Image (tube, coloured by chain):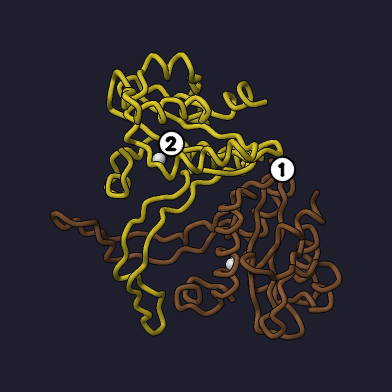
Chain colours: A yellow, B brown
Amino acid sequence: NNTPHDRFSNRGMTLEKDINDTNNYYLSRGLCVIHKKPTPVQIVKVDYPKRSAAVIKEAYFKQASTTDYNGLYKGRYIDFEAKETKNKTSFPLSNFHQHQIDHMEDIVKHEGICFVIIRFQAYNESYVFPAVKLFPYWHRQFKDGRKSIPYTAVKDEGTLIPASFPALVDYLTVVDEIFF
Amino acid sequence: NNTPHDRFSNRGMTLEKDINDTNNYYLSRGLCVIHKKPTPVQIVKVDYPKRSAAVIKEAYFKQASTTDYNGLYKGRYIDFEAKETKNKTSFPLSNFHQHQIDHMEDIVKHEGICFVIIRFQAYNESYVFPAVKLFPYWHRQFKDGRKSIPYTAVKDEGTLIPASFPALVDYLTVVDEIFF
Ligand SMILES: [Mg+2]
Ligand SMILES: [Mg+2]
């Protein structure tokens, strides 16, 4: 569960770090321009000491209204969220907020490429799970549906991301396969 | 000059606010999905009080490595930076950092739509100035060129953005004209 607290205290940051490293590699090779968005912060108090940089003295983590990553690949807009779970049998939908789902639905409507990267830590497997396959699970949970996506469904409906070096989470190869 | 200090202390935020309002209107009308990226902050110290939200106690503004805004419009990737100046005769290139120019050059290379919105506060005029027209001015300054873009050049090579309500900076109409 990737709350701001978790994010800062370093739990659940492995996937994010792996993707950031992969993006830096992609960028250096000129393959795409995809960046992590900065963590949204509500700034309350700032000091402006003379002769040195402004210091933020009070601020709070805000809930993100969009996704973690976006950018440009082969002339197409790309947008995705990265989530990992310790769970072995399913991926809990509580990892998402309604805002993020709304955003992903907008992206699909406007013909962007949109997906989630889901990592099962127990198996060290990361999957590209297209947003259009996520939406039915999300909406079903509110009408007596289950509140998670079974691991087997992620395996079946998603695509395993190959790991290599330095592309630790080489998701562009999967994007090529699914969206181009 | 849109340094983090300026940004927080509210100077030079009018254009940003006008664009954010315009984007919210665009989003609500389903015209595009374009957001301001959060201000990048380097977090140094966080308190986790019991029974209440984490409080950031020490943090610093970081220089942005990309641009202010990006998103998706009519299936195309859009990326832009917003800058305003009090200057009446030219727009100083010191408003940009090399990082941002590098980023914009990458976007153009990968076939994204990329531009700057430049506002001359004295005239209350905002222009779409395409990134490809900015690059020559940027590079020329290092070989005895001038360190600003003349107001007349912004007028000639850029396109004046119409202001309406609630689209205070109705840049999509200009994007339609230039890029589609
Ligand atoms: Mg995430
Ligand atoms: Mg700006």
Q: Which residue is mark 1?
A: B110
Question: Which residue is depicted at the point 68% across and 69% down?
Answer: B164
Q: Nearer the viewer, residue B24 or A65?
A: B24
Residue B40 location in percent, x, y? 46, 59
Amino acid, disc 1 = His
The residue under label 2 is A82
Disc 1 under 8 Å from ligand 2? The reply is no
Quadrant position of the N terminus of chain B in the picture: bottom right
Kindly identify the residue that appears in the image at 62 percent across and 21 percent down: A177
Q: Is mark 2 within 8 Å of ligand 1?
A: yes
Within the image, what quadrant is residue B160 found in? bottom right
- Could you tell me residue B125's position as x and y percent? 72, 77
Looking at the rendered structure, the kind of residue marked 2 is Ala
Which residue ends up furthest to the right in the rendered image?
B156
Neighbourhood count class around disc 1 (C-alpha, 10 Å): few under 14, some 14–19, many 20 upward: some
Q: Residue furthest left?
A: B50
